[in-house]
Image (spheres, rainbow, N blue to C red):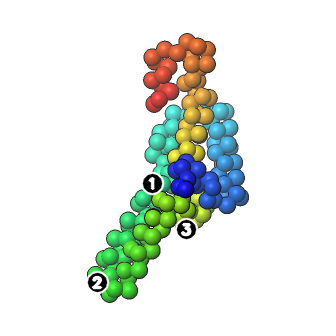
């Protein structure tokens, strides 16, 4: 049975790598809690951060196109690259496993859920949800939390 997208990175990552990514996120949140004036710029950075799925969706077609080009120019042996790349994408879609996932995670790429967790922690520190917790949710409070 396929795993849900947000679980894939965590389930298929070495616990040590996963823990280090989590610690890095916690350290960043603690830093921004001490420097709330910098939260807005960090939120913009998070909006631009590539998640693991986006990286895979970019890496595999690049390898495929490279292999097709090399196969057309230098011979059929290069066609193994598109075969491998697309097999890995299929494996990722069906089983949630991607052979390069550990490498990408070591490089610091996180799942969309992990990025969102940091984003919402920073928004909570900034006070975006204060009106909601006080039961005084206004349209402005909801709009800011969604930004």
Cα distance, mark 3 to mark 1?
15 Å
- Disc 1 residue crowd, few under 14, some 14–19, many 20+, Cα 10 Å: few
Figure check: 49 above or below 76: above
**Residue 97, position as x, y percentages in the image:** 55, 62
Figure check: 27 above or below 71: above
Q: Label 2, on which residue?
A: 73
**Residue 104, position as x, y percentages in the image:** 55, 61
Query: Which residue, as the protein is rendered here, is positioned at the far left?
Result: 72
Considering the image in quadrants, where does the C terminus appear? top left
Q: Label 3, on which residue?
A: 99
**Would residue 90 appear left or right of 35 to someone viewing this image?**
left
- Residue in the picture at 46% in, 42% down: 47
- Disc 3 residue crowd, few under 14, some 14–19, many 20+, Cα 10 Å: few
Q: Nearer the viewer, residue 38 or 43?
A: 43
Q: Which mark is residue 139?
A: none
For residue 107, say whether it is visible: no
Q: Nearer the viewer, residue 57 or 87?
A: 87
The reply to whether the C-beta atoms of the residues labelled 2 and 3 are less than 8 Å apart is: no
Q: State the image quarter where residue 28 is shown.
A: top right
- Residue in the picture at 67% in, 58% down: 17
* Of the image marks 2 and 3, the number of the one nearer the N terminus: 2
Query: Which residue, as the protein is rendered here, is positioned at the far top?
Result: 136
- Disc 2 residue crowd, few under 14, some 14–19, many 20+, Cα 10 Å: few
* Of the image marks 3 and 1, the number of the one nearer the N terminus: 1
Marks 3, 1: nearer the viewer: 3
The reply to whether the C-beta atoms of the residues labelled 1 and 2 are less than 8 Å apart is: no
* Of the image marks 1 and 2, the number of the one nearer the N terminus: 1
Q: Nearer the viewer, residue 35 or 97?
A: 97
Q: Label 1, on which residue?
A: 54
């Amino acid at each position: 049975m396929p795993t849900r997208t947000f679980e894939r990175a965590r389930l298929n990552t070495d616990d040590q790598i996963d823990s280090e990514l989590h610690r890095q996120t916690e350290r960043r949140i603690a830093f921004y809690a001490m420097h709330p004036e910098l939260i807005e710029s960090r939120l913009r950075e998070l909006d631009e951060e590539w998640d693991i799925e986006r990286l895979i969706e970019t890496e595999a077609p690049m390898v495929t196109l490279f292999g097709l080009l090399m196969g057309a120019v230098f011979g059929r042996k290069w066609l193994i690259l598109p075969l491998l790349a697309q097999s890995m994408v299929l494996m990722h879609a069906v089983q949630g496993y991607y052979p390069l996932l550990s490498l990408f995670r070591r490089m610091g790429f996180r799942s969309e859920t992990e990025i969102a967790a940091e984003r919402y922690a920073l928004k909570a520190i900034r006070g975006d949800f204060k009106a909601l917790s006080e039961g005084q949710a206004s349209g402005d409070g909801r709009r800011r939390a969604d930004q």
